Image: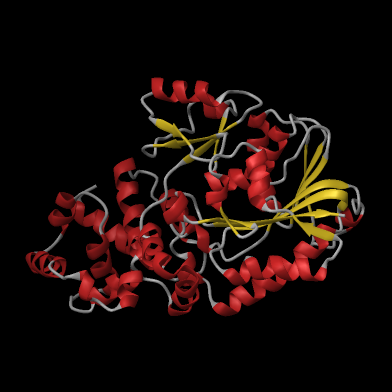
Amino acid sequence: MNPKALLDLAVDLLREVLRFEIPADAVVSAFFRQYRTLGSRERHALAETVYALLRERLLWQNMAQSGFGPLERRLVILAWAGQEAFLRAALTPDELRWLESTRDMDRSTLPERLRHNLPDWLAQALKPALGDDFWPLVESLNRPAGLDLRVNTQKAKREDIQATLAAAGIETHPTPHSPWGLRTVSKPALYKMDCFVSGQIEVQDEGSQLLALLTEAKRSEMVVDFCAGAGGKTLALGAMMRNTGRLYAFDVSAYRLDALKPRLARSGLSNVYPAGISHERDERVKRLSGKIDRVLVDAPCSGLGTLRRNPDMKWRQSPAAVEELVLKQKAILHSAARLLKPGGRLVYATCSLLTAENEDVARAFTAEHDEFTVVPVADILTRQKVAAAADLCQDEFLRLWPHRHGTDGFFAAAWERR
């Protein structure tokens, strides 16, 4: 495709994304289905330009005020993440001169909001909690996330998979903490490789792998993944249980559970029972009350811990939305707690950075449920042979940060029923 046509497509795609009606990744996927003839380099340029714009939207919008022509075109020019020569070939002489003038700007002199590129409400929530770590976090959130893999221990060993990938020219390193994980040096295409097709590996952030470890799920137990979604943690739990016992994957979204089916087939697990529920008080939940050994509640949340992957989340969320989520999180956690038998383990987790969705929810649950005892997360991770477990924890909780741990932002708390 010639440069001018590709730049026009980038403008069209950005217009769709900036409506913020649905997640950006869904918009991009739908756009690429519409333009199936695009090559991999063209798709990469379009997608990465959109995500670059979303990461630093306030900055680019401020800089675009000095330009001319349609705003979306100016934004695409500023945030372009494809080949430089391709961009230059698409621009007029006036646009080239304007672009060069914007690149001479000293960003360190800009106001804070143009440097952190966060909504005011989010910056105000994070700065007091992080102190001197606020700006390192901002820098990490404005970089794309890496790619982590979880080795399915039912089918393979981590060192064997690492050797297999190396033979295919894919360099990886063991994840620093998860005993199952590999972190790729680049972002290779894995989905046609035998080790992926056969279910020996799954794409899963190291932080998500650690959440599964917190359950300490064992052979022959009854376990519930209460908000299973597409089932990444479900599959990790099933492998922990050595494909024995019963593992229920609950979710209110049949669409998300459908995404689990092909992954489940690849995994080789036969102890997983996906089940759609209407709400947290569904009859299917009530029938299991007091019978379950382990419950993982990876609750619906703002998703602000995944901003490296989903930068549009910071523009699509709001304080009012977070307040609604907190109410939902508390209701789900209370209902999930009823499933546990005495001695059972409850784990509450989010991929949020906000204290309101994390520590505040966990401490409120502890205060309201004297039949549950807090289990320090560092103790669990140490038993699970997680390296440097104490470095992952804050007080009795798991607290993972992109700038400190190289993972998405995760929180988790654990309790045991008396």
How far across and down, in percent of the image, does residue 344 sit? Answer: 83, 49
Q: Position of residue 316 (x, y in %)?
A: 50, 70
Above or below: residue 164 compared with residue 393:
above
Give me the residue at 57% from left, 34% from top: 179
Of residues 142 and 42, the one drawn nearer to the viewer in this rendering:
142
- Residue at position x 36%, y 53% from top? 47
Q: Is residue 64 visible?
A: yes
Is residue 261 at all visible to an observer of this figure?
no
State the image quarter where residue 68 is shown.
Answer: bottom left
| Total marks in image | 0
349 or 283: nearer the eye? 349
Q: Is residue 172 above or below residue 146?
A: above
Q: Quadrant of residue 337?
A: bottom right
- The x and y percentages for residue 403 are 42, 55
Applied colour scheme: secondary structure
Residue 113 relative to residue 229: left or right:
left
Screen quadrant of the C terminus = bottom right
In the rendered image, the vertical position of residue 154 relative to residue 116, given as above or below: above
Q: Is residue 340 left or right of residue 393?
A: right
Q: 49 or 297: nearer the eye? A: 297
| Residue 79 in picture, x, y percent from top left | 27, 62
Q: Is residue 78 left or right of residue 30?
A: left
Please name the residue shown 59% across and 23% down the image.
Answer: 156
